[in-house]
Amino acid sequence: MNYLGDVEDLYSWGGIRALEEMASYLIENGFHDAAKETLNLKYNIEQSFVRSEVIHRRLERVWYTATKVKNHDYRMEDLAEEIEKYRGNG
């Protein structure tokens, strides 16, 4: 992995593994402070994945229904109903 590339490259499972490997390398060579921050970045990315997945699951039906309304396959009332479910009122 090219560690000097774009930060987006880190947001893949390969990037996360590479961060773990880099942290291990830094620890082996006595650079504990840099290793700690590298691991903090890794944990932040992993947490971001989990949070994003939860939000995605909550919005999935809303987005699906909105797309169908936009394409004139569903009615706006269908979207309003899905929004109520999303809000916990349906």
Image: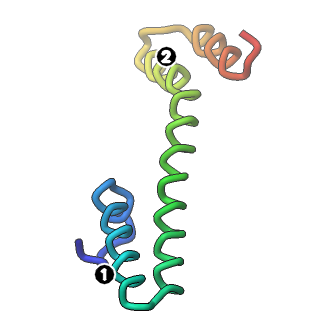
Q: Is residue 8 left or right of residue 61?
A: left
Q: Residue at x 45, y 23 (%)?
A: 67
Where residue 12 sits: x, y (%)? Answer: 33, 55
Lower sequence index among marks 1 and 2 = 1
Q: Residue at x 48, y 48 (%)?
A: 49
Tag 1: Cα neighbours inside 10 Å, few (<14), some, or many (≥20)? few
Query: Label 1's element?
Result: loop
Please state which amino acid type lies under the numbered disc 2.
Val
**Disc 1 or disc 2, which is closer to the eye?**
1
Tag 2: Cα neighbours inside 10 Å, few (<14), some, or many (≥20)? some
Q: Residue at x 48, y 58 (%)?
A: 45
Asked if residue 3 is positioned above or below residue 20 in the image, the reply reads below
Image quarter where the N terminus lies is bottom left
In the foreground, 4 or 77: 4
Q: CA distance from mark 1 to mark 2?
A: 44 Å
Q: Which residue is mark 1?
A: 4
Image quarter where the C terminus lies is top right
Q: Which mark is residue 90?
A: none
Asked if residue 77 is positioned above or below residue 7 in the image, the reply reads above
Q: Residue at x 46, y 64 (%)?
A: 42
In the foreground, 67 or 87: 87
Please state which amino acid type lies under the numbered disc 1.
Leu
Where residue 58 sits: x, y (%)? Answer: 58, 27
Query: Label 2's element?
Result: helix
Where residue 62 sits: x, y (%)? Answer: 55, 22
